[in-house]
Image (cartoon, rainbow, N blue to C red):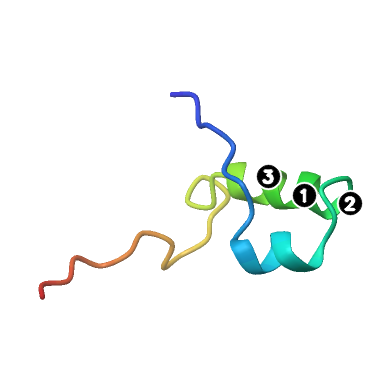
Amino acid sequence: MAHKAKKPKPMLNASVSDTNPVHVVDVFVNELDLVKLGFEGVIPADTFL
């Protein structure tokens, strides 16, 4: 399943220019499959309001 790249959070956009390489890093990190890489606690628990 292909994931669409998400734009960084507004705070990041407000303080970093659109051409700053940090945006590439942000997209890369968001695309990592943390479960497949062995991280625990990645899937949020079901919560009820």
For the C terminus, the quadrant is: bottom left
Check if mark 3's residue and mark 2's residue have beta carbons within 8 Å: no
Residue 25, given in percent of the width and then of the height, sits at: 78, 50
Which type of secondary structure does the marked residue at label 1 adopt? helix
Check if mark 1's residue and mark 2's residue have beta carbons within 8 Å: yes
Residue 23 tag number: 1
Residue kind at label 1, given as amino acid type: His
Image quadrant where residue 32 sits: top right
Residue 20 tag number: 2
Question: How far apart are labels 1 and 2 at the CA level?
Answer: 6 Å
For the view shown, which residue lies furthest in the top direction? Answer: 1
Residue kind at label 2, given as amino acid type: Asn
The residue positioned 25% from the left and 67% from the top of the image is 45
Residue 31 tag number: none
| Residue situated in front as seen by the camera: 31 or 12 | 12
Residue 8, given in percent of the width and then of the height, sits at: 64, 54
Check if mark 1's residue and mark 3's residue have beta carbons within 8 Å: yes
Question: How far apart are labels 1 and 3 at the CA level?
Answer: 6 Å
Q: How many marks?
A: 3
Which type of secondary structure does the marked residue at label 3 adopt? helix
Give the residue pinned by disc 3: 27
The residue positioned 65% from the left and 69% from the top of the image is 11
Classify residue 42 as left or right of residue 28: left
The residue positioned 58% from the left and 49% from the top of the image is 37
Q: Which of marks 2 and 3 precedes in the sequence?
A: 2
| Residue situated in front as seen by the camera: 36 or 7 | 7
